Image (spheres, rainbow, N blue to C red):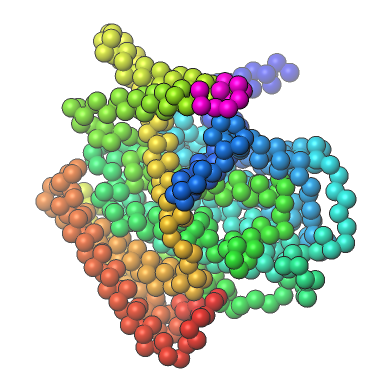
């Protein structure tokens, strides 16, 4: 099976080479930059930047990231189930498969409702 | 030395098709993206009763090339406090992930780089999601408030809609029973119906989620001009900027291709198994021929000799494509003995046409939404994702599962499976309305304590 990924690997090298080569090419053909002073400051709509940008930002982004881990891992668990589900249904074991996934999703939905009530899904 | 050449020959013999596909994609995709941008500007102009780009080439047909040259020779500015290495690396990462995702897609039955990887569509989704690293790193490296804000918004947005998109894909995969891209399309041929018809709610969910994931209007908060200048791209200029642009449009093509493969029948013709509708095969050559005739008619109206010649060349290209498209249809009619020999060509050529046609239709829908709807506010966007799409998509998966059990119980196949899935879709719609009403009620209760204009 790893052999199947060989073309992908070669293509990956090609794909990384393309932007790298064009960036170097652009460096060779464009005129040298003579900018200095305020032009090289970060853009702040015309005024001088007040502070360093890499400061603190809203904690909501962290909450969203944590929720993402929970829900996306759940989606990943659904993928193998979804692949096998059709076979189970055709051999009349569909109800078993569905109920077991219902239990899994049910636990998650309870968590979702709890998060909803807590206001973790509110942005403003 | 001889052994090395022999090994190389052996290797090339085995992998020449994927290699040619890969080279073709890397060489042609930037051009295609340039013309997608031109088409978008033209459609936007048309919807706003303007002409759009008209100066460079006839009807602005050379505009993408002029833009590319301009971007190549533009001054490259790196802000003083920027992290130089990351600033250099971020666009490469972004465009690399977007282009690499193309490896898993099948444009026609033979045109695919990663032909027998068994994780198929999962590979595409996973790799294209890696593009967010390029955006976040680029926003962080440029040391500008706008960039960082845009990058954070972009990651939060992608992360919020990834789950909904994944659930929508699960709905399609329930019917397909495989992750392999070729097998998914074959499953749609065997079952005689596209999965988008069986699971319209999943298609809708994927549509909305894919717009959010590609940062397109009305969900283009990360690059909202009115608040964030250009979001994570604010400090990028020249060719770096155009790499981000390339990544964005390639991502659009990737999500459109995923939707086409899983929900819209991939490279299959509409009603591909219905004999008496075979005359649909004449549509692709006729369409390209009509475009060619239109170009011919416009030729005398071009002001300069060069423009007339270019227009003629475009017409010629259209006629050539029309001839290529017509040959697999006309040859079996003219010479029935060649019918079997022509069939693989038919699958490849017409399959490619239908795939590109469907992807174009999907992208056209993206553009249409962009020019029609105003931009969302960030808290509205988050609420749509977490309060509406995620619960709806989870419930939709379960409803589709039930519909499949009912379908097998009553031996429903093909179009008759709609009898089982249509009630499930209607149920999902009712639940969607219920979720919306519930959410609105919650909002109404909280309303007095909140300031009326809460921008995120």
Q: In the rendered image of this protein, does residue B412 appear above or below residue B224?
A: above
Q: Position of residue B43 (x, y in %)?
A: 47, 45
Residue B292 in view (yes/no): no
Q: Does the magenta segment cover residue B5?
A: no
Residue B223 in view (yes/no): yes
Residue B5, quarter of the rendered image: top right
Q: Position of residue B300 (x, y in %)?
A: 50, 23
Q: As drawn, is B388 to the left or to the right of A6?
A: left
Q: Residue at x 29, y 68 (%)?
A: B432
Residue B397, quarter of the rendered image: bottom left
Q: In the rendered image of this protein, does residue B246 appear above or below residue B286?
A: below
Magenta stretch in the rendered image = B300-309
Q: Residue pushed farthest bottom?
A: B449
Q: How many marks?
A: 0
Q: In the rendered image of this protein, does residue B430 appear above or below residue B262?
A: below
Q: Residue at x 68, y 50 (%)?
A: B241
Quarter holding the N terminus of chain B? top right
Quarter holding the C terminus of chain B? bottom right
Q: As drawn, is B62 to the left or to the right of B255?
A: right
Q: Position of residue A39 (x, y in %)?
A: 82, 60
Q: As drawn, is B291 to the left or to the right of B103?
A: left
Q: Residue at x 28, y 43 (%)?
A: B194
Q: As drawn, is B244 to the left or to the right of A50?
A: left
Q: Position of residue B28 (x, y in %)?
A: 57, 32
Q: Residue at x 80, y 59 (%)?
A: B79
Q: Residue pushed farthest left?
A: B410
In the foreground, B263 or B148: B148
Give the main secondary structure of the magenta stretch: helix
């Amino acid at each position: 099976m790893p052999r199947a990924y060989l073309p992908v690997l070669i293509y990956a090298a090609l794909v990384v080479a393309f932007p790298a080569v064009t960036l170097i090419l652009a460096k060779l053909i464009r005129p040298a930059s003579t900018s200095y002073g305020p032009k090289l400051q970060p853009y702040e709509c015309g005024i001088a930047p007040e502070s360093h940008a890499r400061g603190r930002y809203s904690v909501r982004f962290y909450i969203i990231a944590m929720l993402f881990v929970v829900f996306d891992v759940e989606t990943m668990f659904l993928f193998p189930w979804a692949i096998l589900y059709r076979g189970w249904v055709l051999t009349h074991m569909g109800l078993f498969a569905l109920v077991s996934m219902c239990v899994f999703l049910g636990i998650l939905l309870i968590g979702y409702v709890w998060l909803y009530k807590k206001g973790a899904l509110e942005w403003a | 030395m001889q052994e090395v050449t022999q090994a190389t020959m052996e290797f090339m013999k085995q992998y020449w098709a994927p290699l040619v596909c890969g080279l073709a994609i890397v060489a042609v995709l930037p051009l295609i993206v340039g013309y997608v941008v031109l088409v978008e500007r033209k459609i936007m102009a048309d919807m706003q009763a303007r002409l759009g780009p008209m100066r460079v080439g006839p009807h602005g047909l050379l505009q993408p090339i002029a833009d590319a040259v301009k971007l190549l020779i533009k001054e490259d500015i790196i802000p003083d406090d920027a992290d130089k290495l990351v600033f250099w690396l971020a666009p490469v990462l972004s465009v690399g992930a977007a282009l690499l995702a193309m490896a898993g897609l099948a444009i026609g039955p033979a045109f695919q780089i990663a032909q027998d990887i068994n994780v198929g569509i999962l590979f595409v989704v996973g790799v294209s999601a890696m593009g967010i690293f390029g955006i976040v790193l680029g926003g962080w490296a440029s040391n500008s408030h706008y960039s960082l804000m845009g990058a954070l918004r972009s990651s939060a947005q992608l992360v919020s809609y990834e789950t909904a998109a994944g659930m929508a894909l699960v709905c399609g995969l329930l019917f397909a029973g495989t992750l392999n891209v070729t097998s998914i399309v074959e499953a749609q041929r065997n079952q005689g119906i596209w999965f988008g018809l069986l699971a319209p709610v999943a298609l809708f969910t994927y549509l909305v989620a894919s717009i959010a994931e590609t940062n397109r209007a009305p969900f283009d908060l990360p690059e909202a001009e009115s608040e964030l200048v250009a979001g994570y791209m604010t400090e990028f200029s020249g060719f770096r900027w155009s790499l981000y642009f390339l990544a964005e449009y390639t991502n659009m093509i990737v999500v459109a291709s995923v939707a086409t493969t899983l929900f819209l029948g991939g490279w299959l013709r509409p009603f591909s198994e219905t004999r008496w509708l075979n005359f649909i095969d004449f549509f692709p050559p006729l369409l390209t021929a009509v475009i060619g005739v239109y170009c011919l008619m416009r030729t005398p109206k071009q002001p300069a000799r060069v423009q007339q010649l270019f227009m003629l060349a475009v017409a010629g290209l259209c006629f050539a494509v029309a001839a290529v498209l017509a040959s697999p249809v006309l040859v079996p009619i003219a010479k029935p003995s060649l019918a079997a020999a022509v069939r693989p060509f038919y699958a490849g050529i017409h399959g490619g046409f239908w795939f590109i046609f469907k992807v174009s239709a999907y992208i056209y829908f993206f553009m249409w939404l962009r020019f029609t709807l105003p931009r969302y506010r960030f808290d509205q966007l988050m609420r749509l994702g977490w309060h509406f799409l995620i619960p709806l998509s989870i419930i939709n998966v379960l409803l589709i599962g039930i519909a499949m059990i009912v379908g097998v119980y009553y031996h429903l196949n093909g179009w008759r499976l709609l009898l089982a899935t249509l009630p499930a879709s209607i149920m999902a719609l009712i639940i969607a309305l219920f979720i919306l009403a519930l959410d609105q009620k919650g909002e109404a209760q909280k309303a007095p304590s909140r300031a009326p204009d809460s921008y995120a």
